[in-house]
Image (tube, rainbow, N blue to C red):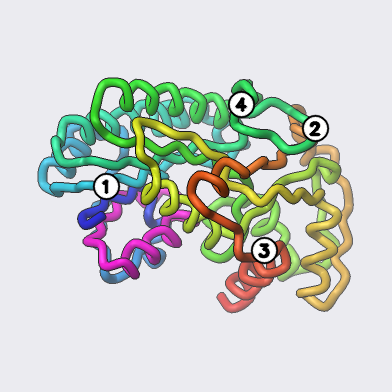
Amino acid sequence: MKKVLLTGGAGFIGSHVADLLLARGCELTVLDNLSFGRREHVPAAARLVELDLADRAGVQACFAAGGFDTVVHLAAIHFIPYCNQHPDLACRTNVEGTQNIFDAAQASGTVARLFTASTAAVYPDCAGPIDEQVARAPMDVYGMTKSANEEQAAILARRSDIRVSVGRFFNAVGGRETNPHLVPDILQRIRAADLIEIGNTSPKRDYIDVRDMATGVLAMLDGNAGPIDTCNIGTGEVYDVVEIAEFISRIHRRRIELRPAERLIRKVERQNLQADSRRLQTRYGWRAQHSIHDSLAYAYDWYTQR
């Protein structure tokens, strides 16, 4: 990898991937419309192109000028409640925008490797660890758009010589979060009070450190011999909301109390999302390096120091 285009590089996971790419000496271009990402998350050594994925002509011009050999496509609207409330915008960005990236990569004649982010939200509600053979059955708009992205990726792999990697992201945790997911929501609210209202507390999630997520992305880019491979990127360990609040309480050194609120409960909710990440481990030699306590401490420090 020499010249890399990173979409969504001003975001949570993207900015950590940017750090790793620059540490390798890559010439990095970040494409982000900054609707959710933050300019300050883009490393100074990267070139920022402020552009919407749905701007097909703009995306094509970016590729034509860039001469990229590698694409890391992370840009999307991620927050599930927002996607459910704005399905038109989610589809425009996540599906139409992704097609624009894939078409421009194929037309460029220079792109040899492409990583695209999918999600654990493509899976149905399953007990126990979920491997990549489980059929996709998304339960929300976000998962539906990412399931579509996987079909788009498969078509790209069939009609081009680009080696395509698809990473199904589980729940990333750490600093620089840009969406109000569970952990950043708790960390924001304990600034005002240690008693917080919460919705569903029983669902269990596989929380992975954002730094481990970033190394998983690069592991697939480095090792995929093509034409396409799909891997879960998660830890295999799950925790419910009560356990996460208890872990944060220890870091916070004050007890966080949860008060259930009916208005915050999602009508559709998986009870378990747990990664079987053996494929990523055996094929690419990847291992998570951070515990849940490391991840939450990183998130806590980032929020409390701002």
For the N terminus, the quadrant is: bottom left
Q: Quadrant of residue 91?
A: top left
Q: Is residue 134 magenta?
A: no
For badge 2, the amino acid type reads: Ala
Sequence-earlier tag: 2 or 1: 1
Task: Identify residue for label 2.
Answer: 127
As drawn, the residue found furthest toward the front would be 282
Q: CA distance from mark 4 to mark 1?
A: 27 Å
- Label 3 crowding class (10 Å Cα cut-off): few <14, some 14-19, many 20+? some
Q: Which residues are magenta?
A: 11-36
Residue 130 pos. (x, y %): 69, 34
For badge 3, the amino acid type reads: Gln
Q: Is residue 269 above or below residue 181?
A: above
Residue drawn 74% across and 28% down?
125
Sequence-earlier tag: 3 or 4: 4
Task: Identify residue for label 4.
Answer: 133
Q: Nearer the viewer, residue 5 or 190?
A: 5
Task: Identify residue for label 3.
Answer: 188
Task: Identify residue for label 1.
Answer: 70
Sequence-earlier tag: 1 or 3: 1
